Amino acid sequence: MNDRQKKVVVLLSGGLDSVTVLAIAKDSGYDCHALSFDYGQRHSAELAASRRIAEAMGVAEHKVLRLDLGSIGGSALTDMDIAVPEEEAEGIPVTYVPARNTVFLSLALGWAEVLGAMDIFIGVNAVDYSGYPDCRLEFIQAFENMANLATKAGVEGEGFRIQAPLIAMTKAEIIRTGMARGVDYALTVSCYQADEHGCACGICDSCRLRAQGFREAGVDDPTCYRDSSKV
């Protein structure tokens, strides 16, 4: 079996980065199994987007796991009493969800082991991002090391690889990479406070980074905005 026949688990949030990573994995010939999470986030629009993407891109399987990170709270994305910031701030923002990527990757690791997939793709990015500690290369490397210490497949098999192909790209580079692979970014939702139709606020940190990426890539922005004057 060569790499073009191997199964892979791809974390699919429904946003711009995760759909690009899925496109990269598919373009590399992997048999893609997409994993999304209903974790108590503010809106269901990104889950609807993940389902649209999975269907449009013809993944082998799309699994949605339910978690209750809202019961822990501590983030504007899971606690309705914490407002999503609409201005840039110093340090790690309140949209950081405590240990989210650690939890997500752990569950992806379990599914990968069951599937016999030795690769997990995640769309973290350490250039145009909001300063989250679990989007850094050091975290990805540490998790991969842990994965190969903590699993039967890691100890007895060839070893897991946590692939983060976007880690050093700008948003514009990510968009160009996806466009070259035929990604339809109109299917995606990135906004922290999108409405039920998936239309974006245009002013949160995620919206600002996304809009800037399309401008710098020289690509028309297909995002549905509630108020385009704010972009």
Image: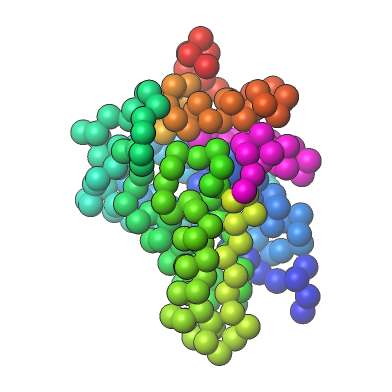
What residue is drawn where x is 59% and y is 26%?
212
Does the magenta-highlighted stretch encompass residue 230? no
In the picture, measured across the screen, residue 72 lies left or right of residue 217, that is left
In the picture as drawn, the residue positioned furthest to the top comes out as 229
Q: Position of residue 34 (x, y in %)?
A: 57, 57
- Of 230 and 183, the residue lying toward us: 230
What residue is drawn where x is 52% and y is 34%?
189
- Of 148 and 35, the residue lying toward us: 148
Q: Position of residue 114 (x, y in %)?
A: 52, 76
Is 20 placed above or below 116 here?
above
Residue 10 found in image quarter: bottom right
Residue 87 visible in the snapshot: yes
- Of 119 and 92, the residue lying toward us: 92
| Residue extent of the magenta highlight | 168-191
What residue is drawn where x is 49% and y is 53%?
136
Residue 199 visible in the snapshot: no
Quarter holding the N terminus is bottom right
